[in-house]
Image (cartoon, rainbow, N blue to C red):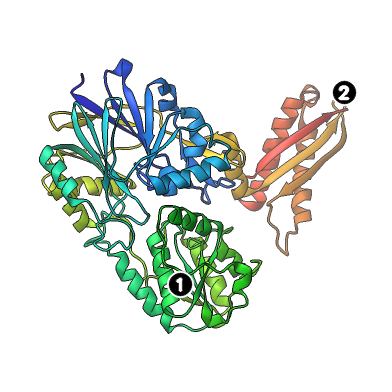
């Protein structure tokens, strides 16, 4: 029997998103493990061609014989979006509450894994054993149905893993925070609390969904023309508020975007979204008078393939917006998405569409705890150790300092791959570091983040691509070429692209002519020498060094 347990994040620490956490118990040579959450993050301008990014599970894959289960705290993509992709490497039972389980099944079916995965649906108040782990679900509030904290007990003691949460006295959907359970754990003794850090810099509290509902009802009542509300599809309470705002003002609701249909189907499967009118399909909605329809759309973050972007581009099959219509962004700007969101809003504005955001009206609240809520949680749980997660480095360091100011005796700021040993005496320390990289989903392939293909794409995105082809006979004579083809090179009126190509071809030919007879007969030498010459010439003309490939064809 061990007097300590292990916490090991492989994703979600030093970053917001892509959560994958491990808990271990037992002697090192036979330590049992569970996974808490298995999520994704999304590609950006620094990862051209990459849509999804996942934590690298190599460490736990290598210990799969001692992996006894995966528990999902809730159904946001950054907590469960990697399940279908990574499960074939892990092959462990998965535990999830009904709403989350519905969405996991839907994703597993998409990947043809539904009949292979041991998915165990559990109740919101479940308490169950996984090997040496006694796991109790704790009802919290968040911006999605059925968010759960986990009380993880071993013979070493109790660790509280909060997942994502806030304190909402009127969440509209689901129960309020189970304060009595948290207080009981505080009395029992919490060794460590692994806690959300997203809003640690924000004073006060995050606000209630009930306030958003009232604001949306009032706002929609003021508007004429067509109205579209862009929101996170996973925020079912917000969808409910948008529906109530429409119906209170004589409008019917049309869902636009695959995620909207998926989330509302999941919500209805567990008894949510009751007592509302049937949704209007997209084609039928076009026949409604403008003041009688409200579109509930995906794409609040400016995603180029989402419904609202296609509407803004004017290429949506059934939905159009124009002069006098309004789009309400009932969402926040996620850091990193600013460019896409502002471009989307500009395209809508150019069409004469009115734009209303959370900066104009109180139509969004965060799903994560601000400082007053964090202080309240620490007051309930009374942990001996604070382990901040779900934040960038600055968030985790600030959270650790804040916890100390609340008289928490110890705080550990972890990075992905840091193995933390939590002792039964209420102390903790980082004892090891394991590999904790990233996997990129590149079309149908899964590649490591340091893959040469990704590096090449970054280089191409900055400085283009040049190919030089030439034919050389076995005596070292130039038979044909050098011929240059290129992509991504600039031109202006004083230096057309043809002149650029001519200069590069001249540089290649002159370099070949200066080579000795023996060198001309060695394709490898010819390729490298011409590659360097062409790259230097491009840099002299342009000030950038493009990627250059040289092909020597023996004749």
Would you say 56 lies left or right of 282 here? left
Up-down relation of residue 354 to residue 10 (above or below) = below
Up-down relation of residue 495 to residue 415 (above or below) = below
Would you say 550 lies left or right of 395 here? right
The answer to which quarter of the image holds residue 497 is: bottom right
Observer-side mark, 2 or 1, equals 1
- Sequence-wise first label, 2 or 1: 1
The front one of 322 and 419 is: 322
Q: Which element type, helix, strand or loop, lies under badge 2?
A: loop
The answer to which quarter of the image holds residue 533 is: top right
In x, y percent, where is residue 472?
85, 30
Does residue 331 appear anywhere in the picture? no
Q: Residue at x 76, y 40 (%)?
A: 468
Q: Which element type, helix, strand or loop, lies under badge 1?
A: strand
Does residue 49 appear anywhere in the picture? yes
Which residue is tagged 2? 475
Which residue is tagged 1? 328
Q: CA distance from mark 2 to mark 1?
A: 72 Å
């Amino acid at each position: 029997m061990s007097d300590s347990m292990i916490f090991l994040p492989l994703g979600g620490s030093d970053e917001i998103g892509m959560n994958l956490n491990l808990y271990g118990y037992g002697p090192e040579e036979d330590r049992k493990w569970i996974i808490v959450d298995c999520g994704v993050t999304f590609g950006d301008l620094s990862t051209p061609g990459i849509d999804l990014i996942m934590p690298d599970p190599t460490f736990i894959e290598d210990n799969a014989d001692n992996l006894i289960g995966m528990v999902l705290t809730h159904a946001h993509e950054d907590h469960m979006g990697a399940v279908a992709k990574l499960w074939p490497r892990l092959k462990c039972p998965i535990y999830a509450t009904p709403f989350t389980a519905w969405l996991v099944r839907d994703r597993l079916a998409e990947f043809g894994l539904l009949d292979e995965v041991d998915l165990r649906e559990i109740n919101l108040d479940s308490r169950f054993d996984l090997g040496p782990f006694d796991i109790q679900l704790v009802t919290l509030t968040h911006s999605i149905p059925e968010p759960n904290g986990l009380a993880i007990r071993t013979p070493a003691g109790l660790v509280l893993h909060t997942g994502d949460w806030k304190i909402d006295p009127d969440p509209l959907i689901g129960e309020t925070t189970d304060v009595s359970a948290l207080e009981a754990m505080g009395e029992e003794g919490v060794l460590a609390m692994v806690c959300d850090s997203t809003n640690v810099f924000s004073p006060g509290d995050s606000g209630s969904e009930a306030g958003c509902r009232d604001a949306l009802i009032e706002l929609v009542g003021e508007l004429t023309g067509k109205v579209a509300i862009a929101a996170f599809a996973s925020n079912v309470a917000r969808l409910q508020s948008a529906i109530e705002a429409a119906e209170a003002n004589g409008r019917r609701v049309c869902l636009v975007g695959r995620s909207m249909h998926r989330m509302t189907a999941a919500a209805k499967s567990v008894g949510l979204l009751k007592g509302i009118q049937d949704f209007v399909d997209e084609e039928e909605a076009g026949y409604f008078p403008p003041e009688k329809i409200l579109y509930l759309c995906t794409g609040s973050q400016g995603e180029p393939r989402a419904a609202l972007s296609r509407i803004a581009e004017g290429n949506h099959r059934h939905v159009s917006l124009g002069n006098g219509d309004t789009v309400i962004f009932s969402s926040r700007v996620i850091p990193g998405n600013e460019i896409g969101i502002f471009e989307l809003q500009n395209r809508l504005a150019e069409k004469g569409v009115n734009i209303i955001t959370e900066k104009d009206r109180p139509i969004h609240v965060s799903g994560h705890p601000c400082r007053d809520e964090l202080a309240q949680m620490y007051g309930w749980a009374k942990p001996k150790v604070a382990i901040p997660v779900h934040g960038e480095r600055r968030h985790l360091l600030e959270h650790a300092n804040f916890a100390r100011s609340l008289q928490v005796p110890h705080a550990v700021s972890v990075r992905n791959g840091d193995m933390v040993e939590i002792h039964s005496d209420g102390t903790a320390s980082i004892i090891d570091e394991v590999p904790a990289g990233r996997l990129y989903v590149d079309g149908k392939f899964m590649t490591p983040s340091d893959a040469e293909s990704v590096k090449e794409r970054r280089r191409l995105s900055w400085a283009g691509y040049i190919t030089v082809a030439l034919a050389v006979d076995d005596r070292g004579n130039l038979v044909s070429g050098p011929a240059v083809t290129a992509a991504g090179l600039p031109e202006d009126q004083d230096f057309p692209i043809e002149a650029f190509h001519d200069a590069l071809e001249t540089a290649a030919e002159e370099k070949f002519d200066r080579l000795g007879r023996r060198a001309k007969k060695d394709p490898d030498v010819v390729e490298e020498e011409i590659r360097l010459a062409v790259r230097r010439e491009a840099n002299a003309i342009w000030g950038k060094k493009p990627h250059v490939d040289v092909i020597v064809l023996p004749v």
